Amino acid sequence: MPRNDSPGAKLLSTWRKLSPYPGGLWLFTQIVKRMIPYTGSVSPRVEVLEPGYAKISITQRRALEQHLGSIHAIALMNVAEFASGAAMTTALPPGYRGIVTKLSIEYFKKARGKVTAESRPELPTHIEGEHDFYSDLTDAAGDVVARATVRWKLGPVPTK
């Protein structure tokens, strides 16, 4: 029997409490960075979060660059995975969660400046199991710089 709480419900609840206020987006980002330290390492900025949709950006800075002067491939994968997970988990029914089992990404052009990951996963009718969800990453001009596929294993939150 699934529990009544879930990671996605907690994330969405925190977002809804903080996002309307001045400084709320910054505070939400600080909470995410503390909860998910590796994701926080790219300093993501959640711009929109609602059940089944996430828009999350990162901005180029020296710590995210590779030797060619653009955003490193793994920083892009990081924000793409976060967007797919945030969108998907906030759409799950109460008591469910997901864990990544596979990541893949295609790169189309160098990512420079502000890059935004957007994900709009459609949940399957049978939730339990492994499912692929997608994130598109675009630059400030609106060009797609990369497209990620994130496979999530979905199931009930274990009882303690």
Image (cartoon, helix red, strand yellow):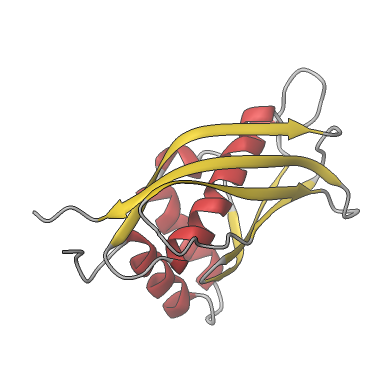
Give the answer, above or below, for where 77 lies relative to 129: above
In the image, 23: left or right of 94?
right
Q: What residue lies at 45% left-to-right and 44% top-to-bottom?
A: 152
Q: What residue lies at 62% left-to-right and 36% top-to-bottom?
A: 77
In the image, 6: left or right of 126?
left
**Closer to the camera in the image, 56 or 29:** 56
Give the answer, above or below, for where 67 lies relative to 97: above
Residue 27: percent from the left, percent from the top? 47, 64
Q: What residue lies at 62% left-to-right and 29% top-to-bottom?
A: 74
In the image, 115: left or right of 45?
right
Residue 122: percent from the left, percent from the top? 57, 63
Q: In which quarter of the image is residue 55?
A: bottom right
Residue at the extreme bottom: 20
Residue 59: percent from the left, percent from the top? 71, 46
Residue 76: percent from the left, percent from the top? 66, 37
Residue at the extreme top: 67
**Closer to the camera in the image, 100 or 62:** 100
**Closer to the camera in the image, 95 or 137:** 95
Image quadrant occupied by the N terminus: bottom left
In the image, 58: left or right of 87?
right
